[in-house]
Image: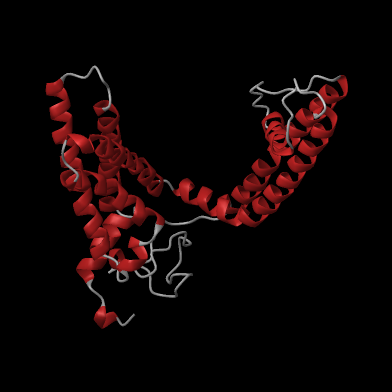
Amino acid sequence: MDVKNRNLLKERFHEVIFEADTKEGKLFDIILLFMIIASVVSVMMETVPSLDENLRYVIHNIEWIFTIFFTIEYFLRIYCVYKPKKYITSFFGIIDLLAILPSYLSLIFGGAQSLMVIRALRLLRIFRIFKMLSFLNHGHVLLAALRASRPKILIFLTFLLIFVSIMGSVIYLIEGGNPESGFDSIPRSVYWAIVTMTTVGYGDIHPRTELGQFFAALIMICGYAIIAVPTGIVSSELTKDELKDNSTQACRFCSEEGHDVDATFCKYCGELLNDTGNN
């Protein structure tokens, strides 16, 4: 972007709101983190049936203060990026919107007959707690590791579906002739295989024959090994990402993060990163 077209005020807001490399940015993050925790606690407290009505009224008013604060913060975030649509449609942009939307929707859907609807909408405010991830660099590392692990995990899940289908079919052949066992269809037998392999063990259906019980024991042992696979996949990606030293810089144009500490340009869109702190 041409230096002449840069908006220094907008970039200054961006540095404080989106980043934590300056004292102002760190202070803003601390205040915002406190507000998020306090707002989540107020939402939880408001659902306590034995809460005094006067206290409930106070909490309700405090909740509106939080809503106004988060609304101002949301529009400031839109203002200080050069491509607002990128932020609005991003994961945290949607979370920020969901954090404030239910309060305003409750003003529209009024009346006693709509109380259940409003109550359900207000549950969406709990999404504020997801905003806390944006303050933790390790939260970004975890998200990056999950994204990098996605192809391997999809292959693993495909194999897992095939495996439980085979195991369910086998146990159906073993136990299907016994009406008391509960294995009356292959889908129900596949359900049993999933429950057994994950070591949940509801006990609603179980093999009655000795061969079926032996087969179930084998599935349980396999379950311990299989559950460890996705953990190992994500852990290997986490090890790779932890070797990288990333800054809190967020691009003003594409809203992407995870840049190196000495990066000058965004590695996703090529635009100049925020350098108002160095001017």
Relative to 118, is 212 above or below?
above
Residue extending furthest toward the right? 211
Q: Residue at x 22, y 38 (%)?
A: 114
Q: Residue at x 70, y 38 (%)?
A: 187
Taking 125 as reference, is 246 left or right?
right
Whether residue 195 is visible to the viewer of this picture, yes or no, is: yes
Q: Position of residue 229 (x, y in %)?
A: 70, 42
Q: Position of residue 78 (x, y in %)?
A: 26, 62
Q: Quadrant of residue 12?
A: bottom left
Relative to 36, is 101 above or below?
below
Taking 227 as reference, is 140 left or right?
left
How many numbered callouts?
0
Pick the front one: 117 or 24: 117
Q: Quadrant of residue 60?
A: top left
Q: Residue at x 74, y 48 (%)?
A: 159
Q: Position of residue 257 (x, y in %)?
A: 43, 60
Q: Quadrant of the C terminus?
A: bottom left
Q: Quadrant of the N terminus?
A: bottom left
Pick the front one: 230 or 274: 230
Pick the front one: 217 or 76: 217
Taking 15 as reference, is 181 left or right?
right
Pick the front one: 204 or 251: 204
Whether residue 27 is visible to the viewer of this picture, yes or no, is: no
Colouring method of the image? secondary structure
Q: Residue at x 31, y 82 (%)?
A: 2
